[in-house]
């Protein structure tokens, strides 16, 4: 099972790279402009559980207590890395790029960094919470964070936290929604998807960004992480990579499954 834990994310992100690589020039442009909140240059779209992300011609990675940045203006010849080490061994776990900022999930906090200077992250804020695993995604002035119990993250309850980041230097908790076993999540337009492990995944209407409304729950798979594109949802689980269409979030349709043994 330990092998599967690391193999599934690898399959997921590799599949997404292949997906983007298979698009024609027009399709790739549309996808690039719609994801990650990039304002030019090379950007990327990854799941919320990712430990690396791309924005403004820069590759960012996290590893326990270090943020690393690589200039990939010339992808065939990346520059040497710059590294920023955080004190106190915060156990950095996930990273998400949006609008010239990095949102980093750790065991006990969400860190926000300004990357207007792409290779020199500047700390803006630390949103602390009880010890927990916490992938994060962002859209507009709202961050969505899942906090999961029942594992080595140390939490006894599970929640979806909705955080107002209109002032990135002072994030404010707006709402906590009780969950069963939340894992990765993704947001696109007015739709938020939250994986629930053995309980599949939940679909929320976020027309009011800071007041998610549950639309429906899809079961039948282990929901680990998601990447929502325009009307297309990519979801990974322990038994494969799933594709769904969600032109109408109330009527999500399964398209295909790439099985993983």
Image (cartoon, rainbow, N blue to C red):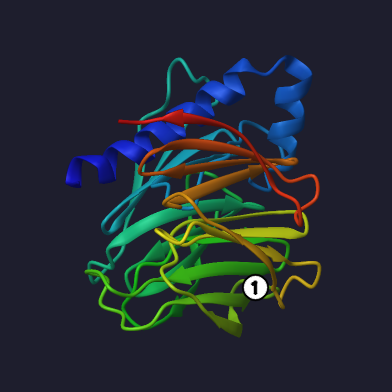
Residue at the image point whose x is 58% and y is 18% from the top: 21
Toward the left, the furthest residue is: 2
- Front-lying residue, 138 or 99: 138
Tell me residue 215's x, y (percent).
Answer: 71, 66
Residue at the image point whose x is 74% and y is 26% from the top: 29
Give the side of residue 14 with respect to residue 238, left or right: right
User: Is residue 219 visible in this depiction of the protein?
Assistant: yes
- Front-lying residue, 115 or 198: 198
Residue at the image point whose x is 40% and y is 59% from the top: 198
Give the side of residue 149 with respect to residue 179, left or right: left
Tell me residue 183's x, y (percent).
Answer: 43, 60
In the picture of the structure, the residue carrying the numbered disc 1 is 165
> Is 164 placed above or below 53 here?
below
**Image quadrant in which you'd find residue 94:** bottom left
Tell me residue 185's x, y (percent).
Answer: 54, 57
> Is 195 placed above or below 11 here?
below
> Is 70 placed above or below 194 here?
above
Tell me residue 134's x, y (percent).
Answer: 41, 67
Toward the front, the furthest residue is: 220
Give the side of residue 134 with respect to residue 254, left or right: left
Q: Is disc 1 surrounded by few (<14), some (14 to 19) or many (20+) residues within 10 Å?
A: some
């Amino acid at each position: 099972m330990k092998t599967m834990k690391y193999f599934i994310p690898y399959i997921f992100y590799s599949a997404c790279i292949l997906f983007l690589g298979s698009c024609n020039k027009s399709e790739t442009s549309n996808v690039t402009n719609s994801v990650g909140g990039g304002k030019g240059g090379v950007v990327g779209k990854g799941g919320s559980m990712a430990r690396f992300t791309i924005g403004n011609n820069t590759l960012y990675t996290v590893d326990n207590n270090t943020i690393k940045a690589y200039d990939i203006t010339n992808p065939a010849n990346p520059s040497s890395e710059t590294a920023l080490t955080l004190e106190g061994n915060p156990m950095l776990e996930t990273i998400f790029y949006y609008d010239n900022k990095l949102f980093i999930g750790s065991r006990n906090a969400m860190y926000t960094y300004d990357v207007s200077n792409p290779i020199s992250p500047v700390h803006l804020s630390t949103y602390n919470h009880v010890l927990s695993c916490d992938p994060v995604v962002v859209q507009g002035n709202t961050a969505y964070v899942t906090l999961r119990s029942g594992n080595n993250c140390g939490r006894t309850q599970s929640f979806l936290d909705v955080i107002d980041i209109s002032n990135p230097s002072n994030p404010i908790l707006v709402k906590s929604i009780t969950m069963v076993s939340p894992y990765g999540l993704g947001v696109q337009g007015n739709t938020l998807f939250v994986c629930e492990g053995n309980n599949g995944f939940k679909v929320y209407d976020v027309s009011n960004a800071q007041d998610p409304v549950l639309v429906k729950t899809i079961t039948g798979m282990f929901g680990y992480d998601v990447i929502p594109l325009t009307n297309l949802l990519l979801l990974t689980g322990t038994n494969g990579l799933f594709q769904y269409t969600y032109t109408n979030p109330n009527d999500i349709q399964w398209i295909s499954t790439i099985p993983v043994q």
